[in-house]
Amino acid sequence: MLNAIETARITKYFDDITAVNNITLEVKAGELFGLLGPNGAGKTTLINLLSTMTAASKGSAAVWGYDVVKQASAVRRNIGVVFQDTTLDDRLTGRENLDLHGRFYGLDSKTRKSRIKEVLLLVGLYDRADAIVKTYSGGMMRRLEIARGLMHHPRVLFLDEPTLGLDPQTRRHIWEYIKTLNRKEGVTIVLTTHYMEEADNLCRRIAIIDCGKIVALNTPQILKNMLGGDVITLEVENPEDTGNLCKIYESNEIPSTISCNDKRIFITLKDGERRIPRVLALASDVRIPIQSVSLRKPTLDDVFLYHTGRAIRDEKEPGMAERVGYRLRSRRK
Amino acid sequence: MVKKALNTVYAMWLREMLRFSRSKSRIIGSLSTPLFFLVILGAGFSSSFEIRGGGMFDKSFLAPGLIGMSVLFSSIMGGVSIIWDREFGFLKEILIAPVSRFFVALGKAVGGVTTAMIQGTLIMIIAWLIGVEYVSIPGVLAAIGVMFVTGIGFIGLGISLATRIESHEGFQMVMSFLTMPLVLLSGAFFPISNLPAWMSYLVYANPLTYSVEALRFCLLGSSTIPLPESVAVIVLFALVMTGLGGNLFGKMRV
């Protein structure tokens, strides 16, 4: 089976920033693939590289067998892209937007007409087709953009943060549409997101991206299983104690993986609920006060944390030095 | 290949027309400025001045200049509107499509020039209704041709500028530092035969001067610059600007 996307050590520099760093990746035809990472991780740049919007600094990529640089035009015919920000003409109606798109992709008038109906029905906008886009809600605009991306029967559809800024209910609707079109149209879908639930819910495989690199790639289930169990989160009163306590846990008899972040320590282990007493006892032995303790079954959040040393939704972006620090401290046992 | 190019041009033109037909206030707004000039300046000037060497300095003299002005405004606007397409995102939709950038720019230009010609023609008709007399019907048709060539040139200029301007604040700069001097130094409001030397250089370096002169010849039957010369200049200007605009747009990044 043909791979829908193949990249070979693709890299993109912006001035002194490496937005995409040596990414080698394969996405199979028909797959629903997710790129998961925080803002600024390089997801959008990667999509731009694959959709021929940006030229790579190094390395290469092929979409549906076509090189994104040498055969850009063939790539463009075979992909649909829904960008993060809207790219609709809001003075035109939904139907007119789709019709123009069809013209740009060389569809004849009969095909355009029938295809417009098909894609509008698919995203549930058929009855609003002749309203001016300006009057659409955010969710409707996103659905119209997805419909437009599908107009010309692309082999691969890129969705850059398809549910960004939408309310939870609308988000679930969009998920349903995405799943439906992956199934009904058989189109390969690559989506980026920084919502864990989205990646978990939708994607067959996900690549976790941080600082321009893929840090993990697998099905959500396997990624979660790889963590080796539940996560106990401890919060200490003094951030200075974090390091010491980490060392204590690292050198004791419990088989676990430790990582920490400011005031919090994350201990990943099997059978978490039975281990909590021992974990707390170790802390009280060295008289380090614990503020809180919690136990969670692993989610993709933990997978992310495990691979990058920080939570995906951390408000403050840690500087490079801090980040390296986290990596050094979070090591497997 | 040719069919594909034509499709692209047509799709871009269609979009401009759809947008134009929905912005009635814009049409009225852009007609009002030249009409105020025509009626008020025309009446005011004709009561006070007479052109040296005969001829009245009145609304008939002003009409070709104001048609030129309106074509200039709407065509530069049409080109520079790529800034809006970029800000509101639609530009990405065009740039990701498997179509030639050059024909996208050309379609944009043809769309813009159509709106510019509609506005120029409307002013021409209104001027006629309020008493400006044109020499002949072929002259009127030729004037529409002049509007077309002029429009293409200034849209090319607008597109070239849009590829260099980062934001819509920059757009304000263009409007005040480019269009006003172009209009004022074009002979739209005064005869260009007896100007001080410094100003004469500027006027003769201004492509709009040749448009206004060509319009004046077509509509009123006489002009300071001979028709072949003015037509040659505006055609050359249109070709150069189309090449430049198409080229810069081709290299444009979002």
Image (cartoon, rainbow, N blue to C red):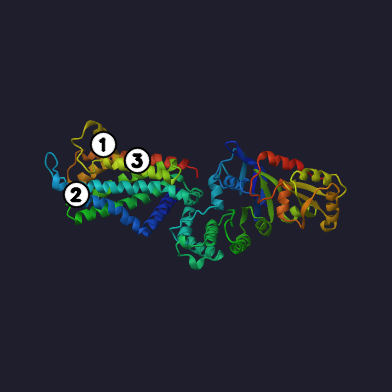
- Left-right relation of B207 to A206: left
Residue at disc 3, secondary structure: helix
Please name whichever residue, B12 or B192, is drawn nearer the observer in this view of the structure.
B192
- Left-right relation of B133 to A34: left
Residue most toward the top?
A: B197
User: Residue B42 has which mark?
Assistant: 2
Q: Are marks 1 and 2 on the same chain?
A: yes
- Left-right relation of B244 to A228: left
Q: Earlier in the sequence, mark 3 or mark 1?
A: 3
Compute the Cα span from label 3 to label 1: 16 Å
Say if B209 sits above or below A111 in the image: above
Name the kind of residue labelled 3 in the image.
Answer: Phe
Please name whichever residue, B194 or A46, is drawn nearer the observer in this view of the structure.
B194
**Which chain's residue wears label 1?**
B
**Which chain's residue wears label 2?**
B
Residue at disc 1, secondary structure: helix
- Is residue A255 visible in the rendered image? The answer is no
